[in-house]
Every structure is written in structure tokens, then in C-alpha cells.
Amino acid sequence: MFASEKVRRTIEVVFVISCVVVSGFTQAAPIATNTALPLSDEELIVRQQLVVARSSGRPGAQTQIDRLESRTVFGYGVTSRLALFSVLPVVQINRDFGNVNDSEFGLGDAALFARYEVFRADKPGRTVRIAPYAGIRVPTGRDGKTGDGSVDFFGGIVATVASTQWVLDSQVRYDDNREADGFKRGDLVTLESSFQLRLAPAQVVFDTKGFVFGVIELSATKSERNRVGGVIDPNSGGFQLSVTPGIQYSTRRWIADFGVKLPLVSDLNGSALESDFAVLTSIRVNF
Amino acid sequence: MKYRILIMAFVGLITNAALADDVQYDIRVDGITCPFCVATSERELKKIDGVHAVGANLETGTIFVCADSKVEFTDSQLKQLFLDKGFTYRSFTKGAGCSIAENESEE
């Protein structure tokens, strides 16, 4: 039993390290989210994201949770308007409750979603696109440890306005979280905007190979309280507003980005943990 | 020495003839805003037999295609090609000779 657990953990560690190594060696879109990734007919993209995040309790609570997450994202353009995505996370969670520490490592809950472009208006060097999306999150993580154990649903609409100088992606999203084993995470409403401004080159010339974008993202999340055994957890849910400044380099075949998500406003219920920061980095390749 | 000069002249004539046979299509496409966007269309265009090189001017929304003179694009063909890649085809012009080098479209 012990040996098989050790083998499984070794495989998981190798998988995460592989992901990080791949991302180390290898059109502007948001840094924090994947719903606005551009895809055309029969195009495949692979995005490897690495997120390091810390949450902690109110001052004096001595509670801290560190989360390292590697997300492998596959996107495929079924047609020029319909795209399918999968997001497979592998997570390492370290909890520090003062005198008690524990950690979990393994697959997180995977997500699958489809996006359909309902509006497109193109001009020379400009475009406007609107696309609703819907998806499902399946309990591939360990129940109560690296995953929620529930089958959850989410949907939203994403709009993109782009020129050769800048890109603005905005979305509204609703997460309908379901109950599993007596636990139900609160539903979420999220509003997000990402503005990407071309910093270099100053002029686009015939053989421009790549763009450097400065990125600023805003994310507002309102979440309901969790329910445990049918009872509302008063120390959960609330409102959070965060900002993510970052940088992105875009070439014909790959895009790399880096950002740091910082809280601006945290109006959380009870003693719910507040997000301190999240460092996000990713590389995306199209095939 | 005479033979060498003759061979070089012959090769030069053949090369010039080949270049003279090339044509350039300047294709107006709307909605292309970044190098990443160009790549997908470029790959599709390069699948066409006789296409040598592809370049782009993002500011004007023009894609340049250097091809053999036997390559004949049509409006309906280009409209569908760029529609599949997520962009809007407008028009094209065709001219003799190529102003883009073979490696313009290389990463």
C-alpha cells in the first residue's frame, strides 16, 4: 500500500516537473484566464500555466495556505467559430494552521468547456468578437483534498476588441457549484477585464516577428457562502477585487506571459481566508 | 574556364527565368491584429502547391503571397480560407515578380 502510494506520488511529481520544464524551454490574451484564447478552424493550442498563490487569515489568525498549481490547457478549433477546451490542473497545497501543518499533492478538478463565437466584425488591423461559453468541472481531484468531489457547471460570455496596438478582453462568468459528500462550495459571479497594450515594437514593419505587450487585468468576484452538511459556513464567501499587472511576448508560434495578481479589495465573510498574491506564468504554442 | 563561364551563364539564365515566372498576390484581410494571428493563415497558404513565401503587413491588413505563375487564386477560395482561419477576406491584386524573400515568413 505504502509502495504504491509512493509510486503514484513519484509519477505525479515527474508530471509536474515535466510540465514546468516544457514551459521553461519553449495574440495577446488574458494572463489569468483561458476563455478568451483565440482559435481558428482545425487549430490546436497548448498552454502550460504555472500559478503560485498564497492566502492567509486575518492578522493574528496564524493561518496560511500556499498553493502551487500547474495547469495544462488544450484548445482545439472545431470550426472557425466553435472551440473546445480542457484544463487539467496538478496542485500542491500546503496548509499552515500555526501548530498544525499538512500538505496535499495530486490532480485537481479538470474542466471542459466549449465556446461559440456569435459575433465578429473585422476591419483592417482591428476586430471585435463576442462568444458565450459553457463548461463542466469534473471531480478528478481527491475529494476534500485536491478537489471538491462535485460535478460543477459554469458559463459566461467573453468579448474581445483588438487592434494592432492593444487588445481588450472582458468577460462575465457564473459558477454553479454542486454538493458532494455534504460540502457545497458557494456559487460565484466573476467580472474580469484584461487590457493588453503593445509596448514594442513602436512601429509594425513588414517583417515584425513579435510583440511585447504590457498587461493590466481586473477581476471582481462575488461568492456565496459554502454549505457543510446543509449548514451555512459563516466564514466563507464574500467579495474580492484584484489587479494583475503583467507582461506578455507574442510571436507567430508561441506566446509567453507573466503577471502578479494582487488584492485591491477584500470584503469577505467572517474569518474567510484572504488572497495575498498569486504569481502567474504561462507559455502557449499553436499547432 | 570557358565551360565554367558557360555553365554559370546557363544557371543564371535559368534562375532569372524562374524568378521572372513568380507572381505576388497582395491579399487584403480584415481582423488580423498580431503575428500569432498571421501564423495560422500562413500555414494554410503554404499548403497550396506553388506557394513559396508568405508575409504580412498588420497595419494595412495585407498578406503577401509569393507563388509560381501557375498558382491562380479565386475570390471564393480565399474567402473560405480566411473565414476558416477566423478572418474576413476583402480582395486581392496580382503582380509579376516577388518583393518578399523566401525567408520572410520564417520565424
Image (cartoon, coloured by chain):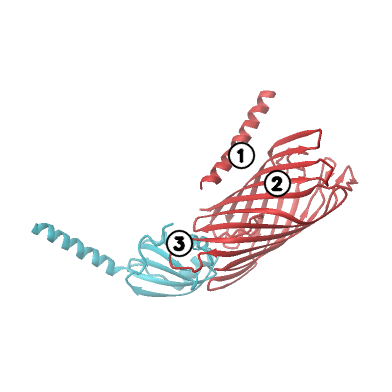
Quadrant of the snapshot with the C terminus of chain B:
bottom left
Q: Is residue A40 above or below residue A49?
A: below
Residue denoted by label 2: A53
| Residue A27 showing in the rendered view | no
Residue ID at (68%, 57%) = A244
A270 or B94: nearer the eye?
A: A270
Residue denoted by label 3: B42
Q: Is residue B96 above or below residue A254?
A: below
| Residue A16 badge | 1
Q: Colour of chain A?
A: red
Whether residue B89 sits left or right of residue B73 in the image: it is right
Residue A129 in which image quadrant: bottom right
Q: Looking at numbered disc 3 in the image, what kind of residue is underneath it?
A: Glu
Q: CA distance from mark 1 to mark 3?
A: 34 Å
Residue B43 in which image quadrant: bottom left
Residue A134 in which image quadrant: bottom right
Q: Nearer the viewer, mark 2 or mark 3?
A: 2
Identify the subunit bearing mark 1: A
Identify the subunit bearing mark 3: B
